[in-house]
């Protein structure tokens, strides 16, 4: 396919992901954007030329900046030797605790022969204390500032890595904007029940300890964050996937499955 077709398809994919993250049909988004369902179907399919004004109407209906709908580079043009021209250096995994960011991230990094990094570990090193102490001694505001500064420092001289981010990173507009601008983001999505069971398997009972409303709160938390997570470049629903299948899904979404096998 031509670069122009790939560019239009990338815009359509972003619109579709944002729409689905909100639970809207094409007709519902078309009505909110005051556009015809046919136009929206063509937009999501990557067909035809797109009017900037119409795309701006879609962005406004989705409550997104117009720039978030427009890909900065084409991800399909390959250089000799298998590299992909224009690909952002850092693959950032996002999602709630229990999404599998560490497990999938380690496997994904191994397949791509890249270092695996956890942003929270870098924050702990910068603060010279574990996360729990950061929150108890200094509060969330301090953590957010440190999270942003740590990520910004990591991006000063970006090298190809797989990065696992904190589950709440998307709630800080400044830090989440930095990820979207500088990283290829992948949302590891799952149902509340799957998150719950994974945490229990890991022995992490903090969210539900002495809290009979824990599942209700988890559902509300996920519902609140889904529109933000849905802004990721790629979405992998891991609810029914094994660790290996989730890793393969991420590789395929990134267009790097063939490269990992050749490598």
Image (cartoon, helix red, strand yellow):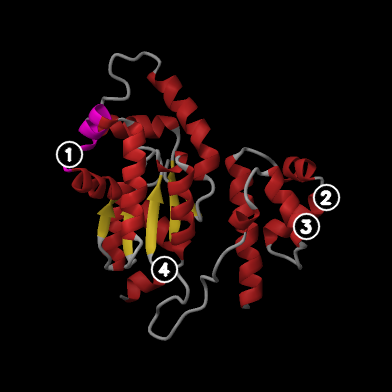
The residue that label 1 is drawn on is 129
In the picture, the disc for residue 53 is: 3
Residue 42 drawn at (x, y percent)? 75, 59
Q: What is the magenta segment's predominant secondary structure?
A: helix
Rounded to the nearest angstrom, the CA distance separating label 1 from label 4 is 36 Å
| Disc on the earlier residue, 2 or 3 | 2
Residue 34 drawn at (x, y percent)? 81, 45
The residue that label 2 is drawn on is 36
Quarter holding the N terminus is: bottom right
Which of label 2 and label 4 is nearer to you? 2
Rounded to the nearest angstrom, the CA distance separating label 2 from label 4 is 36 Å
Circle 4 SS class = loop
Tell me the magenta residue range.
128-137
Rounded to the nearest angstrom, the CA distance separating label 3 from label 1 is 49 Å
Could you say which is closer to the camera, residue 25 or residue 139?
A: 139
Residue 236 visible in the snapshot: no
Q: Are marks 4 and 3 in contact (CB under 8 Å)?
A: no
Residue 218 drawn at (x, y percent)? 42, 26
| Disc on the earlier residue, 2 or 4 | 2
Residue 62 drawn at (x, y percent)? 66, 44
| Disc on the earlier residue, 1 or 4 | 1
Circle 1 SS class = loop
Could you say which is closer to the camera, residue 263 or residue 133?
A: 133
| Residue drawn at x 35%, y 29% as measured from the top left | 196
């Amino acid at each position: 396919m031509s670069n122009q077709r790939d560019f239009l398809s990338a815009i359509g994919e972003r619109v579709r992901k944002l729409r689905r993250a909100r639970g809207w049909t094409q007709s519902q988004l078309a009505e909110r954007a005051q556009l015809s369902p046919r136009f929206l179907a063509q937009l999501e399919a990557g067909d035809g030329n797109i009017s900037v004004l119409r795309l701006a109407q879609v962005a406004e209906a989705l409550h997104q900046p117009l720039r978030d709908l427009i890909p900065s580079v084409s991800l399909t043009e390959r250089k000799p030797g298998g590299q992909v021209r224009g690909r952002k250096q850092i693959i950032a995994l996002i999602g709630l605790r229990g999404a599998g960011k560490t497990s999938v991230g380690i496997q994904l990094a191994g397949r791509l022969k890249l270092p695996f990094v956890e942003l929270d570990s870098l924050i702990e090193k910068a603060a010279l204390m574990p996360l729990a102490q950061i929150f108890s001694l200094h509060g969330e505001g301090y953590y957010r500032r440190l999270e942003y500064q740590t990520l910004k420092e990591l991006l000063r001289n970006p090298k190809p890595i797989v990065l696992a981010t904190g589950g709440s990173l998307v709630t800080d507009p400044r830090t989440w904007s930095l990820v979207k601008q500088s990283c290829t983001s992948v949302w590891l999505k799952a149902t509340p029940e799957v998150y719950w069971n994974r945490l229990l398997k890991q022995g992490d009972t903090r969210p539900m300890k002495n809290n009979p409303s824990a599942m209700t709160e988890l559902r509300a938390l996920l519902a609140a964050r889904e529109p933000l997570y849905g802004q990721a470049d790629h979405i992998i629903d891991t609810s029914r996937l094994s660790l290996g299948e989730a890793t393969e899904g991420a590789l395929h979404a990134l267009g790097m499955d063939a490269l990992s096998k050749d490598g």
